[in-house]
Amino acid sequence: MARPNASELRQLSDADITEQINGLRRELFDLRFQQATRQLGNTHRFKQSRIKLAQLLTVQKERQSSTAS
């Protein structure tokens, strides 16, 4: 999973960002479940997913604060 640039994320629509955020939250849930049952082989996926989620949440928050101002 290649990490997109912040500029690429800013070009996404609000609906796309929300959809990706929900998908990543679900993926993190599944990864935690796999880790608990010792089925997870690639533990680095946690970090990748958390970083991408943080980037998306940052872009979403920027948009919310810019519309509020």
Image: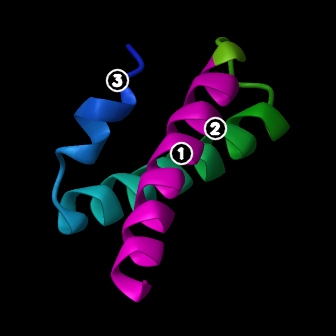
Q: Secondary structure at mark 1?
A: helix
Mark 1 and mark 3 in contact (Cβ < 8 Å)? no
Task: Report the span colored magenta.
Answer: 45-69
**CA separation in Å, label 1 and label 2:** 5 Å
Query: Is most of the magenta stretch helix, strand or loop?
Result: helix
Which residue carries the number 1 mark?
Answer: 53
Mark 2 and mark 1 in contact (Cβ < 8 Å)? yes
The amino acid type of the residue labelled 1 equals Leu
- Tell whether position 65 is magenta: yes
- Is tag 3's residue or tag 2's residue first in the polypeptide sequence? 3
Q: Residue at x 33, y 65 (%)?
A: 18
Point out the residue furthest to the bottom here: 68
Q: Is residue 65 above or below residue 62?
A: below
Disc sitting over residue 65 in the figure: none
Point out the residue furthest to the front here: 69
**CA separation in Å, label 3 and label 1:** 11 Å
Q: Quadrant of the N terminus?
A: top left
Q: Nearer the viewer, residue 55 or 34?
A: 55
Q: Position of residue 21 (x, y in %)?
A: 43, 56
Task: Tell whether 51 sits left or right of 13.
Answer: right
Q: How has the structure been colored for display?
A: rainbow
- Is tag 3's residue or tag 1's residue first in the polypeptide sequence? 3
Task: Tell whether 34 sits left or right of 13.
Answer: right
Asked whether residue 26 is in view, the answer is no
Task: Tell whether 15 sits left or right of 20.
Answer: left
Disc sitting over residue 50 in the figure: 2
Disc sitting over residue 4 in the figure: 3
Circle 1 crowding by C-alpha within 10 Å: few under 14, some 14–19, many from 20: some
